[in-house]
Image (cartoon, rainbow, N blue to C red):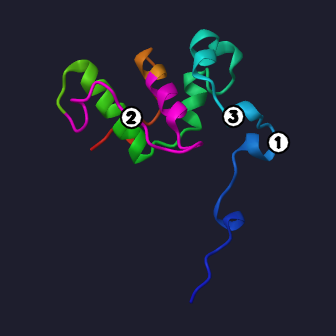
Amino acid sequence: MAQLPSIKTTCTPRDDVLRGGLSDDHFAAQLDQIVCDPAGYAVYGDPDEFFAVTYPTEGLRRLLESTFARLSGKKVRDSEHGVMRFETSFGGGKTHGLIAVHHLAKGARPDQSDAWACS
C-alpha cells in the first residue's frame, strides 16, 4: 500500500503562520466585536483579509446561498426556513459563517467571487 506524502511536503503555510503571527483571537472570533469594532479585530474585522484566509467550503457556500435567497425571496434549498440551526461542534465554523454573512450583507465582495457561488 502506498504511503501518503507528508503534509509538510504537500502544503505551504501562509506567511502569517510561518512568521508565528497567529494569536488566540484567530481561533475564537467574537461576532459582537467584529460588528461593533471591526478595526480592532484584525483579519476577521476586515472583509478583504477575512475572505483572503477563508476557504469557501460547500457548507459555507450553502449557508450564504440560503441566507441571501431567504432575504431576497428567491427559492433555493433551505431558504424556506426563517431559522437555521447549525449542528457543528466547537471549531465547526458557526461563527465564521456568521462573520461571512455579516461582511456580505454590509456590501463586501470577495475576490474570486465565482468560488463562493453555489451551483
Q: Please name the residue shown 64% across and 65% down the image.
A: 10
Image spot of residue 57 (x, y percent): 44, 46
What residue does disc 1 label?
A: 20
Look at the image and tell me in which quarter the N terminus lies. Answer: bottom right
Using the image as rendered, state which of residue 72 and residue 10 is in the foreground. 72
Name the image quarter holding residue 95.
Answer: top right
Using the image as rendered, state which of residue 48 and residue 38 is in the foreground. 38
Amino acid, disc 2: Arg
Inter-mark Cα distance, 1 to 3: 12 Å
Q: Which mark is residue 26?
A: 3
What residue does disc 2 label?
A: 85
* The stretch drawn in magenta includes residue 81: yes
Describe the element under mark 1 as helix, strand or loop: loop
Image spot of residue 54 (x, y percent): 54, 38
Q: Please name the residue shown 25% across and 27% down the image.
A: 69
Look at the magenta stretch and give its main secondary structure. Answer: loop
Amino acid, disc 3: His
Q: What are the residue bounds of the magenta stretch?
A: 76-101
Q: Which is nearer the N-term, disc 2 or disc 3?
A: 3
Q: Which is nearer the N-term, disc 1 or disc 3?
A: 1
Q: Residue furthest bottom?
A: 1
**Mark 1 neighbour class, 10 Å CA radius: few under 14, some 14 to 19, many 20 or more:** few
